[in-house]
Image: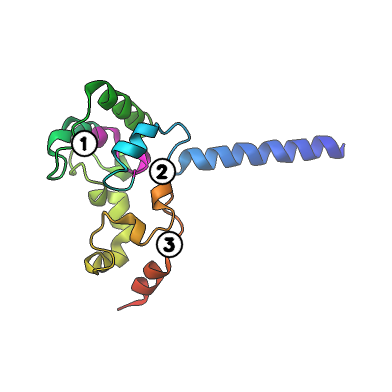
Amino acid sequence: MRAIHAAAVAAALAVTSCATLAEDPARLPADTPASYRSECGGCHAAFPPGLLAADGWRDVMAGLSAHFGDNAAIPDAQRRELEDFLVRHAGEPRRFGSRREPARLTATTWFRRTHGTVRRTFGDPRVGSAANCGACHTEAEAGGFRPVSPLARELARQP
């Protein structure tokens, strides 16, 4: 009887853990292509695709030749592979943007809500901009945005 109970508890925990990971938009999925980390992560954090809605990712990928002031164009086959990955794991439009918002992570409803109290810190020279996730999120380069750095805690305490 104990073995059955233990197996049931283990199965419930595994399902809960998988569901939690699947629903966490602030993590890179397990099937993240290496090319996503190298191409996109070569210039900025390889943002988890769940942080922007599908329409936003389509817009970003369609405009790589003028990507926020840089030419980030990649071969078409690679662009399609990355766009498919991003769209497949995209966030909900209600929280993570829509065509009514710019295709910019820092302009999504979710980002503005979660960073509203610390927006003033983006101008700090140690941070530089809202796009420098690694300044405050210790696991940003690995696709994790939950843990925050000592700098983030320091800046959050400032008036």
- Mark yes or no: residue 22 visible: yes
Amino acid of disc 3:
Val
- Mark 2 nearby-residue class (10 Å; few <14, some 14–19, many ≥20): many
> Which residue shows up at 81% across the image and 34% down it?
4
For image coordinates 29% across by 33% down, the residue present is 54
- Residue 146, numbered label: none
Q: How is the image coloured?
A: rainbow
2 vs 1, front mark? 1
Q: Percent from the top left, x then y, of residue 66?
A: 12, 38
Label 2, label 1: how many angstroms apart (C-alpha)? 18 Å
Say which mark, if any, is on residue 148.
Answer: 3
| Span colored in magenta | 46-57
Tell me the distance, in whole angstroms, between the alpha carbons under discs 2 and 3.
Answer: 16 Å
Q: Element at badge 3? A: loop
Residue of label 2: 25
Q: Quadrant of residue 79?
A: top left
Which residue does the image show at 56% across and 37% down from the upper left?
A: 18
